[in-house]
Image (cartoon, helix red, strand yellow):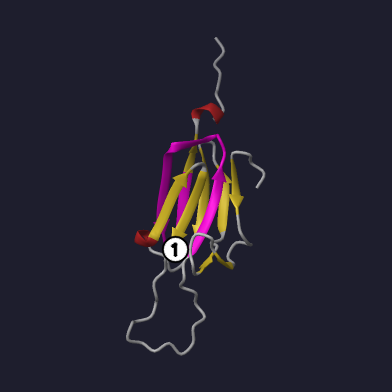
């Protein structure tokens, strides 16, 4: 990512599995799209199987950390014959630059996609100057 206001710290390629230093079990790094609008930077993270209640989104010391636990998709009484769908959880962290308004962050989760909108601070927004 070339924008100096936000960079992603990714332990491995998006969508891969790794052992997180924050958790003891394997987690999946969710794939992400990052784009910029005139007012904000927007992150969309693909997190199938997660629920809104199971997602933790924290902004601390310039790092936005996303974690989610994913419960089993099978009934507890079922005997698993083959398991190919990972249900361990997700983790990804993004380092934010100075151009982010840390008090103005919006997040929503719909259909397995977490969308986080990080609004730009007024100092970095383009300003239209009127000529008198």
Task: Tell whether 1 sits left or right of 73.
Answer: right
**Is residue 127 part of the magenta span, yes or no?**
no
Q: How many marks?
A: 1
Q: Residue at x 51, y 67 (%)?
A: 27
Residue 85 is situated, as x and y percent measured from the top left of the image, at 49, 77
Seen from the viewer's position, the closer of residues 106 and 69 is 69
Indicate the quadrant where residue 98 lies: top right
Which residue occupies the extreme right position in the image?
Answer: 2
Q: Residue at x 49, y 67 (%)?
A: 24
Q: Quadrant of the C terminus?
A: top right
Q: Residue at x 52, y 42 (%)?
A: 62
Location of mark 1 (residue): 112
Residue 11 is situated, as x and y percent measured from the top left of the image, at 61, 59
Residue 88 is situated, as x and y percent measured from the top left of the image, at 46, 71
SS state under label 1 = loop
Which residue occupies the extreme top position in the image?
Answer: 132
Indicate the quadrant where residue 73 lies: bottom left
Q: Which residues are magenta?
A: 90-117
Residue 10 is situated, as x and y percent measured from the top left of the image, at 60, 56
Seen from the viewer's position, the closer of residues 38 and 88 is 88
Magenta segment's dominant SS is strand
Q: Residue at x 63, y 39 (%)?
A: 4
Quick one: label 1, few (<14), some, or many (20+) residues within 10 Å? some
Task: Tell whether 41 sits left or right of 76.
Answer: right
Identify whether 57 is placed above or below 28.
above
């Amino acid at each position: 990512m070339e924008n100096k206001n936000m960079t992603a710290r990714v332990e491995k390629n998006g969508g891969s599995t790794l052992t997180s230093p924050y958790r003891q079990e394997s987690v999946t790094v969710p794939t992400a799209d990052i784009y910029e609008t005139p007012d904000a930077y927007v992150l969309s993270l693909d997190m199938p199987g997660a629920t809104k209640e199971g997602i933790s989104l924290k902004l601390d010391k310039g790092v936005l950390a996303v974690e989610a636990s994913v419960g089993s998709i099978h009934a507890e009484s079922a005997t698993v014959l083959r398991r190919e769908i990972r249900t361990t959880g997700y983790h990804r962290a993004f380092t934010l630059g100075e151009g982010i308004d840390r008090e103005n962050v919006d997040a929503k989760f719909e259909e397995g996609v977490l969308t986080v909108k990080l609004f730009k601070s007024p100092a970095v927004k383009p300003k239209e100057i009127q000529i008198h």
